[in-house]
Image: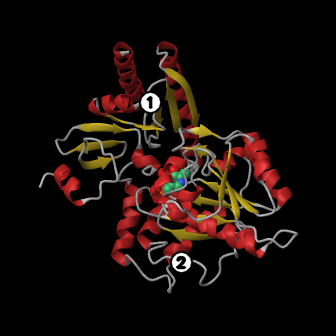
Amino acid sequence: MDTKKAESKYLMQTYNRHDLVVKKAKGQFVWDENNKKYLDFFSGISVCNLGHCNPAVNTAMKKQIDSFVHISNRYYAKVQTELAESLMKKSFPDGKVFLSNSGAEANECAIKIAKKWGIDHPSKTGEKRIEIISFENSFHGRTLATLSATGQLKFHEKFKPLPEKFVFAKFNDIDSVKKLINSKTAAIIVEIVQGEGGVQIAGKNFIKGLRELCDKNNLLLIFDEVQCGMGRTGKLFAWQKLGVKPDVFTLAKALANGLPIGATVANKKTSKVLMSGDHGSTFGGNPVACAAAVAVLKLITPKMLKNVSDKAKYFIKELNGLKKKYKIIQSIRNMGLIIGVELDLPGKDIVEFCINKGLLINCTHENVLRFLPSFVITKKDIDFTIKILGEALKWQMLKK
Ligand code: PLP
């Protein structure tokens, strides 16, 4: 059966898919079933950051597949500890990590840490601390607790009542956070870059202010780096760019460059909140995904991170050139290679135009074109993107 027909017949219709059936992908390119080639500036939503079918990652995965694919977490697996050691040495050498399978799961674990910690450390008046402050426009996942933590209330409507209790402050507004802190508050969860919320970038002073508030009120600070982590900002972790340490941070998407994995990284203070029986996952820390992630962490060198920053600078310079020419562009926001171009109209048609011309990009939050290219892109790839985008903007202007 034709793939598109089979999809609509057999898969739950939860995704709005583009008219593209993928046949293969390599590096920064994707081919469809008619062998049409596309330049991929979306990378599977910031997953294949090191390019599709990265040779070193594939070799590591294949080697692990031939050893063993799964073993229960009741036993030890060396590859899991290799990944944990590598992650912890690069973040909190005296902390610990829990390995899961996705971004939502990584955040669920962080939420459980916050809740248990808040219950174990009640307020001065003896109240259990079970409230978590999140932010308007945030996105933390699709499971019930992470949905509840997500500050885009349109996603809540059909699933109420949701797990309690999340309250929402205004992003980049420290006073709005202060107003929400009370004797029941346990933690603050925030994305340094709100990817699904329209590529909104947290200010350094705002994040510093959150750290100060957490220290003053004995709250946990949780960074959701599921989308912006793993080198995308020009640092391995986005918090390293701002010089502000969280108590817990979460990773997923690009950690294994395409295999499902999630990681909840806890500092020393929070590393023993969850103990035997408190949390678990059959597939969590899958050996093949761990082997891929070990290879990924070896590949993200200072040289590669500098390349991310250099490519981002060039891309932003060229995008600013388009902004001068096309008034449709309202603003350009980025932290490294997570880039949003806000338009004064919906971006859907521009995305379709680009796909037809062989360029994969995305639109988030209705009117923000989002670019998440892999780190293997060249200057030539950026020039191609600017050319196609320029054509798309011109076409939109003529339509207006
Ligand atoms: N957190 C952030 C910041 C995300 O961008 C996403 C997914 O887009 C998630 C969590 C959820 O990750 P997953 O889809 O792997 O569950």
* Picture quadrant of residue 201: top right
Mark 1 residue element = helix
Above or below — where is 80 with respect to 32? Answer: below
Disc number lying in front (2 or 1): 2
* Picture quadrant of residue 130: bottom right
Question: In the image, what residue occupies the spot 41% across and 59% down?
Answer: 57
Ligand 1 neighbours mark 2 (CB distance < 8 Å): no
- Residue 242, given in percent of the width and then of the height, sits at 71, 45
Residue with the most extreme left position: 1
Ligand 1 neighbours mark 1 (CB distance < 8 Å): no
Residue with the most extreme right position: 124
* Label 1 crowd (10 A; few <14 / some 14-19 / many >=20): few
| Foreground pick, 360 / 169 | 169
| Foreground pick, 396 / 228 | 396
- Residue 329, given in percent of the width and then of the height, sits at 50, 22
The colour mode here is secondary structure
Which disc, if any, is residue 280?
Answer: 2
Mark 2 and mark 1: span between their CA atoms? 44 Å
Look at the image and tell me in which quarter the C terminus lies.
top left
Residue with the most extreme bottom position: 74
Question: In the image, what residue occupies the spot 88% across and 69% down?
Answer: 124
Residue type at mark 1: give it.
Lys
Residue assigned mark 1: 379
- Residue 281, given in percent of the width and then of the height, sits at 49, 76
Residue type at mark 2: give it.
Gly
Question: In the image, what residue occupies the spot 80% across and 48% down?
Answer: 178
First in sequence: mark 2 vs mark 1: 2
Look at the image and tell me in which quarter the N terminus lies.
bottom left
- Residue 218, given in percent of the width and then of the height, sits at 82, 62
Above or below — where is 148 with respect to 74? Answer: above
* Label 2 crowd (10 A; few <14 / some 14-19 / many >=20): some
Mark 2 residue element = loop
